Image (cartoon, helix red, strand yellow):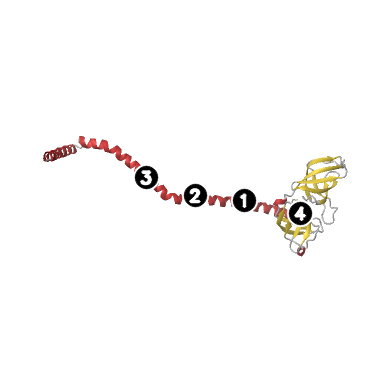
Amino acid sequence: MIVTLIALCVLGVLLGRWQNSARSQSRLDPVSRTIHTVVNPIAHSIDAAWDNIGDFFDGLGRSQSLVAENRRLRDLARVAAQYTETEKRLTQKIDQLRKMMGYQPEPGRKRIAADVIRYFPHENKITISTGSRQGVTPNLAVVTADGLVGVVQVVEANRSEVLLVTSPIQKVGAVALRDPPQPGILRGETATRLLLDFVDTRTPLQVGDLVVTSGLSDTIPRGIEIGKIIQVEQDPDFGVRRAVVFPNVQMGQIREVMVLK
């Protein structure tokens, strides 16, 4: 035991001198070089692993802020989309109001402005925000700048029900603008399809002809646009010539109307 201890001490003294001698010559002694060769790769691996662990925990620490930032960006995108949609809707409304302000009814008639409160597509009706207190009476024509909407059916104090021109039970005198004009009776079929029947089976018609009100009714002025002919049909069984008309007014999109008194 004592011999081993003495041997180790002697070895330590020799290694120390060897190391000092190498340092005085600005170089590593063989033992230190060997230790560096063995230890350095292990140290680098440990450092890299520790850096990765640090990055992992740093990511965990920042995850809440990243989630919050992601949520904020989604909210901004949603707001931007809503703004664009609102801007588009308001622009359309302004354009419609400008057209309505420029609409000139038949001389001797006045316009009563109203908002559309409700739309009943299955009943082909709308409710508007004017009634008897504003001078509205049954059977008056309701229009937009694009054309005929329908006819007032039920009147209350401050609101009215309008039967749309698209209703199958609504019949309106109409004229296809040819030379000469061709009169007929128009009724609804669907929201995008009206039927115009002519008694004269020889009536000359053409796709694209404009259809307007005939003015034969006391309450519906002549010349209000209704739509354009998109198809011409012949019904030999009943001896009727028929035109399919696409309405100018898209009923589900109107927000403001005028009652012609």
Residue pointed to by mark 1: 85
Residue pointed to by mark 2: 70
Query: Looking at the image, can residue 162 be seen?
Result: yes
Observer-nearest of 157 and 113: 157
Q: For the residue marked with disc 2, what is the amino acid?
A: Asn
Secondary structure of the residue carrying tag 4 is strand
Q: CA distance from mark 2 to mark 4?
A: 48 Å
Percent coordinates x, y for residue 109 in the rendering: 80, 58
Q: CA distance from mark 2 to mark 3?
A: 25 Å
Residue pointed to by mark 3: 53
Observer-nearest of 76 and 208: 76
Mark toward the viewer: 4 or 3: 3
Residue shown at the point (31%, 39%) measured from the top left: 44
Mark toward the viewer: 2 or 4: 2
Where residue 256 sits, quadrant-wise, is bottom right
Percent coordinates x, y for residue 240 in the rendering: 86, 43
Ranked by sequence position, the earlier of labels 2 and 4 is 2
Mark toward the viewer: 2 or 3: 3
Residue pointed to by mark 4: 143
Q: Quadrant of the N terminus?
A: top left
Query: Looking at the image, can residue 104 be seen?
Result: no
Mark 4 neighbour density, 10 Å: few (under 14) some (14–19) many (20 or more):
many
Q: For the residue marked with disc 4, what is the amino acid?
A: Val
Ranked by sequence position, the earlier of labels 2 and 1 is 2
Q: CA distance from mark 2 to mark 1?
A: 23 Å
Mark 3 neighbour density, 10 Å: few (under 14) some (14–19) many (20 or more):
few
- Residue 204 lies left or right of residue 92; in this view the side is right
